[in-house]
Structure formats: C-alpha cells, structure tokens
Image: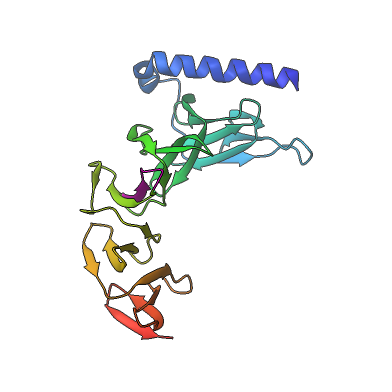
Amino acid sequence: MKAKRIFLAVLLTAALSVSSAAPAVLAESPAAPEVTTITVFRPNLGEEDYMGLQSADGETLLPPAFASIEVVGKFAIVYSDETDSFYLYDWQKRAFTAEYPMMFSNGAYITIAESWEDGNYGLLDQSGAVVTEMQWLWMGDVADDVVWVAADEDTMRVNLLHIPSGKMLLDEWADYCTEFSGGYSGFVRDGHVWFVDTEGHVQETDFVRVEQYTAEDGWFDVETADGTKGKYQPEKNEFTEK
C-alpha cells in the first residue's frame, strides 16, 4: 500500500506539473497519437479492485491504480482513494490536466465542486475549460445548455442558468423546481406553478403544486388551488385529471 501511494503521488504530481507548466507543448506533441477507443479495465477481482485505462490495441494509458474511472469524451474522470481527489485525464494527450475535490459528468458538461458537503459547484466544458466558476451552493442536472442553480444558503431559491452566457433566464428567483423532462421544467414562485423550456421561454399556469411525473417523459404531477390533482404536459398545454 505504501509503494502504491508513493507511485500515485509521483505519477499525479509529475503529470499535473507538466500539464500546467506547458499546455501548448502537450497540445502539439506528435508523440501522443489519438486513440479513438478506450477500455476501462479491472485486472483483479478482490478486496482492492482498482481500475486502469487502456486503448483498443492494448496500450496502457493509466495503470490499474484508481478507485473509479468514468470516460467523458476525450477525458477520463479519475478518482484516487489514496489522495481522495478527482483528476481530469486527457487520454488523447496522455496527460492529467486538472484536480478537484469532486468531479462528475453532467450532460454535455462536467460538474466540479470544492467538496461533497459544502457545494460551491461549477462546470467544465468538453475541452476541459472552466465555463462556470465554483460559486453555486446547489446545482441540478444539465439540460442542453441550461442548469438550475441556488446561491443563497438561507433561502436556497433557484434560477435557471444559461451556461455559455452565464446569464439567468428568470427575472425572479423561484422557491423550488423540478428537473427537466421532455424539454420542460416546472418551478414554483409566489404560490403558483410556472414552466420553462431549455431556451428560457416561460409558461404561467393556475396550478399551485408541481412534481416530476416519472412514468412519462414530458409530464408533471400537478395540483390546482381547489385540491384537484392530475398530470400536465406543458408542451401541449394538456391536463389530465387523476
């Protein structure tokens, strides 16, 4: 275990130092041919079942020394239980490019955060660049180029962030929201239910409660002011009473 810890420390420290010091050199290096297919492999099935990364022709890209590996486009999100950190590995360039306490894929983006407990979420794009700084206390699932975020610890009110521009799509923050389903998300503000699509177009309704209806995509469980319950499809403005 000690030898493995030393090996990982040398591997990660050296790789991150080189990539941060000379990204242009790495990008232009002819010694790193592109690999179109990679394989996550586990050489052992035992108590210490670590993962590595190899190309389709059997080239070892990463040794089996990591607790988890998730391939996202040209990157692999690598977690080391020895360092308790996540690393972004560019498997085409054979280089570690970033380190974060938390990292996972989220739609066409990669969520990063300062910790699992305290939030401060941000996003990387498919090139590995930071497109949303780690400033949000809560972040939902990305839908196309938008994501729900919360900033105020006391209220945890939410707004819809347009990721490329960094702009909020709602004029006012909402009390709570659902995830997107069928291109729409429901949210509650001032005691009423509204719906919004991924382009920020808002639809006001007379409902007072909304939840995501998991049985059918694009439908939501709703309730009217007089207690009538049903399901609603915002795309077609269709309500079905239960």
Q: Residue at x 29, y 73 (%)?
A: 234
Indicate the position of residue 45 as horizontal and vertical percent values. Answer: 77, 41
Q: Could one spot residue 123 in this view of the protein? A: no
Would residue 196 be seen by someone viewing this image from the given angle? yes
Relative to 229, 205 lies left or right: left
Query: Residue at coordinates 69% horizontally, 35% vertically from top-left?
Result: 50
**Residue most toward the right?**
46
Furthest-front residue in view?
154
Q: Please tell me how many numbered marks the rendered image carries.
A: 0
Instruction: Using residue 77 as the reference point, say whether residue 142 is left or right of it.
Output: left
Residue 112, magenta (yes or no)? no
Magenta span includes 149: yes
Q: Quadrant of residue 240?
A: bottom left
Which residue corresponds to the image point at 44% horizontal and 86% vertical from the top-left? 242
Residue range corresponding to the magenta coloring = 146-154
Residue 222 drawn above or below residue 8? below
* Viewer-proximal residue among 52 and 201: 201
